[in-house]
Amino acid sequence: SDIALYHAKGQGKNHFAYYQEHMTEPAQARIRMEADLRGALDRGELELYYQPQVETRTATVVGAEALLRWNHPELGLVPPMRFIPVAEEMNIIDELGKWTISQACKQLKEFHGKKLKLPIVTVNISALQFKMGLVNTVSQCLRETGVAASQLQLEFQEGVAMKDLGESIRILNGLKEVGVTLCIDNFGTGYSPLGYLNNFPLDAIKVDRSYLVKSLENEKDANLVAAIIDIARNMKLGLLAEGVETIEQYQFLNRQGVHLMQGYLFSAPVSAAELEAMLAPWHFMEFLRQLSNHLGN
Ligand code: C2E
Ligand code: MG
Ligand code: MG
């Protein structure tokens, strides 16, 4: 694991000697990671990967989710689940989050400058970024990059806004006033009372991958996904299925009338340069045509 590697690489370096004597191994690894992460942004080690979101009837890329990566000089690509919680504890998540929003907007501008079609870029927002200041950060990034608000989407986890409902609604309304679209990420996994769907000014939900996987294992879970889809329809929310990996999952979603998909079946998250090829209008057309021939419809 990279924690073990952090420990190993820390061996023998003088400034770690104290910690080696007095602390447990994970603590040393953590200290090293914090030290490295502090300068990562300035050293240009952070990068956004992008995963296309595909409208499967028209084979068009309707958006791309920006996913943060840390190119560590020794560890290689560190996944966000490893360092975002650390960044949150170090109180640098605001700075990191602002860079992410700004970078995603700059990238969108660059694609558009090359006449590549990408209607929306969607950015993940961590719970600790979710405060009044986010509204200013977002409008500043849009102003500085010249991206239209309607081209930026923000993704939140359900639990994020549950702590202080009144304040959360003010933040979300503030973001809506700026004009960005709002989406609930990993819908159904946050142990949140469903009433929030009425209280928050939302545009879309993303069905979590775990529901999709289970839906092919038994009928009960399939019914649950169908019910989630109904909720979205009845509440006039957009719906995207994430983590679509298999043809069977694609087929199931197709039967359910879900046509917005994101997942390894289409593409893993890739660098901006690699995404460019997928923004050609015909890129997913042939794949989807073959898929539909294969399925006999
Ligand atoms: P998420 O927003 O739910 O993103 C989806 C995750 O599932 C991504 O992992 C993506 O690479 C992965 N994924 C996509 N398609 C498939 C698939 O078909 N099968 C499977 N098994 N996985 C798939 P990743 O990039 O490691 O990101 C993990 C989480 O880290 C994200 O979950 C998001 O919550 C968080 N994250 C990523 N970037 C940022 C960021 O810039 N800011 C914040 N605050 N959080 C971020
Ligand atoms: Mg997300
Ligand atoms: Mg998700």
Image: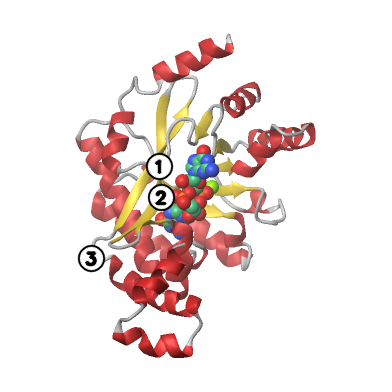
- Within-10-Å neighbours for mark 3: few <14, some 14–19, many 20+: few
Q: Identify the mark nearer the N-term, 2 or 3.
A: 3
Residue 18 in the figure: left or right of residue 144: right
Q: Quadrant of residue 39?
A: bottom left
* Label 1 – label 2 distance at C-alpha: 7 Å
Tell me whether circle 1 and circle 2 mark residues in contact (CB < 8 Å).
Answer: yes
Tell me whether circle 2 and circle 3 mark residues in contact (CB < 8 Å).
Answer: no
Depth order, front residue of 5/249: 5
User: Three-letter amino acid code at disc 3?
Assistant: Arg
Residue 192 in the figure: left or right of residue 249: right
In the displayed structure, would residue 259 be above or below residue 73?
A: above
* Residue identifier under label 1: 269
* Residue identifier under label 2: 67
User: Three-letter amino acid code at disc 1?
Assistant: Pro
Q: Quadrant of residue 256?
A: top right
* Residue identifier under label 3: 43
Q: Position of residue 232 (x, y in %)?
A: 64, 37
Instruction: Please tell me whether mark 1 sits on a helix, a strand or a loop.
Output: loop
Depth order, front residue of 229/73: 73
Quadrant position of the C terminus in the picture: top right
Residue shown at 47% from the left, 74% from the top: 89
